[in-house]
Image (spheres, rainbow, N blue to C red):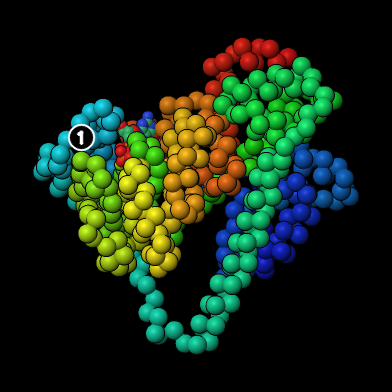
Amino acid sequence: MKIKRFTAGNMQAGLKTISETLGPEAVILSNRRLANGLEIVAGVDEAEYELFLESQPVDQQESDIIKAEPDQPAPQLDSETMKQLFAAMSDKNTQAFEPHATVKQPYLNTRITADVRSMTKAAVQAPKQPAKKPAPAAATPPVEQAAVQSDISMLRREIDGLKDMLKAQAEQLREPAVVTDISPQYERLEARLHTLGFSGRLTRKLLAQFDKEEAIETNWRKTMSRLASAIPTPIYEPFDNGGVFALTGPTGAGKSTTIAKLAAHAVRDHGAESVALVSLDWFQVGGQEILNSVADILGIEFHALTEHDSLQETLAQLSEKRLVLIDTSGSRPAIAHWNNLMEDTALRNQLRTLLVLPSNMHSASVNQFIGLHARKAFAAVVLSKLDESASFGSVIEPVLRNSWPVWFCTTGQNIPQDIEKADARALISRLLDALKKEPAQLATAG
Ligand SMILES: Nc1nc2c(ncn2[C@@H]2O[C@H](COP(=O)(O)OP(=O)(O)OP(=O)(O)O)[C@@H](O)[C@H]2O)c(=O)[nH]1
Ligand SMILES: [Mg+2]
């Protein structure tokens, strides 16, 4: 894929420049506000870009197009302190996050040795960056307020534009395809997609642009490239600006484990003072103790709420924290409770919900889980347990259908190592690994 950064005064001007530079097939990968406009990162499939270049006058500059390489290396937990910390607690991790058949040990934190605690506390103190304080509302002069208002409405419009674009992109995959002339090559690609876990319907959509004049591998590359373009993944660290995030997801999806991993990374990057955990999982016995242990080890603030506590009040107490992570339960009563909480507009506006989906989950089960939520407003998805399911096409389907961005992938039980910022190309190459385990599919595709 060819990727390029653009700066523009607004989204409309940016889209025009992108289309002129990368061609009509370019897609937006990310955008962010700058002091004087917008920075947009866009990309285009190499084959589409070459076609576009051929149609352009010869003076088109290619020198400013850069290859898609990750902007920042994936977080490597190479800090000696963190290594020691988690090596020291690895036994506890294993026990704490054992499969559900195992009875959870109550008060795991009481079994953590004093020296691990003291090492941890020493390791996690001294935040690198001070926690953000809310701006005092009364002190903002009217002119500044007007400027902020106009900024906000501009940002809203830009976000709307972006949403439309993503919708249109996903729509391409949503359109029912009418296949009139099925060739043996088409059938082979169909079989590959089936092996990857895609339904017949999505397979037909993905192959809607199958070109029988092209070699089978060219068709395959283009199909995978289109698939990668349709999965929005972040260029920048999703938690760069902090915030309050609630993780929801089916029972056993990996919510608590993911929170532990995210919290450990945040402590490493910004210090223990800047992070807090809140657990709403009073629905199952021992549901809050695991995070209590994690918080204790990391030296971060932890609030285990009960049905009598107010989430809003707790968040008010934590307003100076850079990052607050809320653990929820996937049980039906817990989701009903969550639905009630989200009726409150003020509370709703304070947080964003991340949907944790295990990669081996069937698309129908995802839909069923989503159906329990009164509001289906998920900021992004965490694809969990990628290590357990090679062919996770079925969970990608609802992601595509709903145009949900995928922010993180988790790849094992180890805290904090087994989590990475999602990358569409890496996801696709993981998917393709599944085919390598099914050599018959490739052998027949000549
Ligand atoms: N293989 C693998 N296992 C994982 C991953 N993430 C979590 N797990 C395991 O999955 C099990 C359930 O994880 P939890 O974090 O307790 O899941 P949860 O969503 O909080 O579960 P509930 O609170 O019971 O709804 C534990 O045994 C974890 O160690 C992952 O990425 N890969
Ligand atoms: Mg949990």
Task: Tell me the quarter of the image containing the N terminus.
Answer: top right
- What residue do we see at 61% from left, 12% from top? 440
Q: Amino acid at mark 1?
A: Lys
Neighbor class of circle 1 (other Cα within 10 Å; few <14, some 14-19, many 20+) is: some
Note whether 149 is above or below 13 in the view shown.
Answer: below
Residue 266 can be seen, yes or no = no
Would you name the residue on which mark 1 appears? Answer: 104
Count of marks, rendered view: 1
- What residue do we see at 28% from left, 54% from top? 278
**Which one is in front, 55 or 318?**
318
**Which one is in front, 83 or 306?**
306
* Corner quadrant of residue 112: top left
Task: Tell me the quarter of the image containing the C terminus.
Answer: top right
Q: Position of residue 323 (x, y in %)?
A: 35, 58
* Corner quadrant of residue 196: top right
- What residue do we see at 45% from left, 41% from top? 369
Q: Is residue 236 left or right of residue 107?
A: right
Note whether 331 is above or below 377 in the view shown.
Answer: above
**Which one is in front, 408 or 37?**
408
Q: Position of residue 9 (x, y in %)?
A: 67, 68
Question: What kind of element bears circle 1?
Answer: loop
Q: Is residue 64 left or right of residue 129?
A: right
**Which one is in front, 109 or 7?**
109
- What residue do we see at 79% from left, 22% from top? 182
Note whether 67 is above or below 306 in the view shown.
Answer: above
The quarter of the image that holds ligand 2 is top left
Q: Is residue 34 left or right of residue 75?
A: right
